[in-house]
Image (cartoon, grey):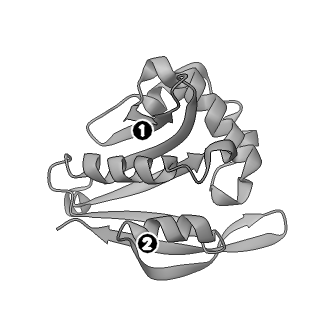
């Protein structure tokens, strides 16, 4: 598994995997397939373009197929620049259990440390997602709260665990 920062050239592959994620695991994301399927190529390129406040990482198989993604975004407000957030973590079902998720998260944590002054990383995960919770806990994330009914899909609500990893 090769983990690297994505760029504009990866936009089409990123968008295909992101849309797949929104279809196969809709309760795991705050966004929807119906919303993002209409994103223009330029919008997707902007999303994956590295910037002073964000990076998107991809996990690639030996054949070059993109099979996992995760975004790290640093808060840019003066009083919250010490915080960053993990968003959009997804690994394709056919490669789950092979270490891609852990490799993505380890790299995201490592890269977060390169953002000057970042002291902690936050993420939200659906409480019922036992495998994701287990992964995050194995990397040192701790649950500091639960948002009841954090997401709603149709008429069903899902609680979200609020997790944090202190880097310093």
Q: Earlier in the sequence, mark 1 or mark 2?
A: 1
Q: Is 38 on the left-hand or right-hand side of 140?
A: right
Q: Nearer the viewer, residue 69 or 49?
A: 69
Pinpoint residue 55: horizontal percent, then vertical percent.
Answer: 36, 39
Q: Nearer the viewer, residue 165 or 85?
A: 165
Which numbered dot is residue 137? 2
Please name which of the two marks, 1 or 2, marks the residue nearer to the observer: 2
Q: Nearer the viewer, residue 101 or 83?
A: 101
Q: At 61% from the left edge and 50% from the top edge, which residue is drawn?
A: 96
Q: Which residue is farthest top?
A: 9
Pinpoint residue 82: horizontal percent, then vertical percent.
Answer: 22, 61
Q: Which residue is mark 1?
A: 57
> Alpha-carbon distance for marks 1 and 2?
20 Å
User: Is residue 134 something that shows in the picture?
Assistant: yes
Q: Residues within 10 Å of mark 2 (few under 14, many from 20)?
A: some
Q: Quadrant of the C terminus?
A: bottom left
- Looking at the image, how many numbered discs can be counted on the residues? 2
Q: Is 89 on the left-hand or right-hand side of 32?
A: left
Q: Indicate whether 68 appears above or below 157.
A: above
Q: Which residue is farthest right?
A: 155
Q: At 58% from the left edge and 54% from the top edge, which residue is drawn?
A: 97
């Amino acid at each position: 598994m090769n983990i690297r920062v994505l760029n504009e050239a990866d936009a089409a592959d990123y968008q295909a995997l992101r849309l797949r994620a929104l279809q196969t695991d809709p309760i795991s994301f705050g966004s929807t397939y119906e919303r993002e399927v209409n994103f223009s190529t330029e919008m997707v390129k902007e999303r994956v373009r590295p910037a002073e406040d964000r990076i998107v990482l991809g996990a690639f198989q030996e054949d070059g197929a993109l099979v996992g993604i995760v975004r790290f975004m640093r808060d840019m407000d003066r009083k919250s620049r010490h915080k960053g957030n993990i968003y959009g973590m997804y690994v394709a079902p056919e490669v789950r259990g092979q270490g891609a998720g852990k490799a993505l998260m380890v790299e995201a944590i490592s890269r977060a440390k390169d953002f000057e002054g970042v002291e902690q990383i936050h993420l939200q995960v659906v409480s019922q997602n036992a495998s994701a919770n287990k992964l995050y806990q194995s990397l040192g994330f701790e649950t500091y709260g639960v948002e009841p009914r954090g997401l709603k899909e149709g008429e069903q609500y899902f609680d979200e665990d609020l997790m944090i990893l202190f880097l310093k």
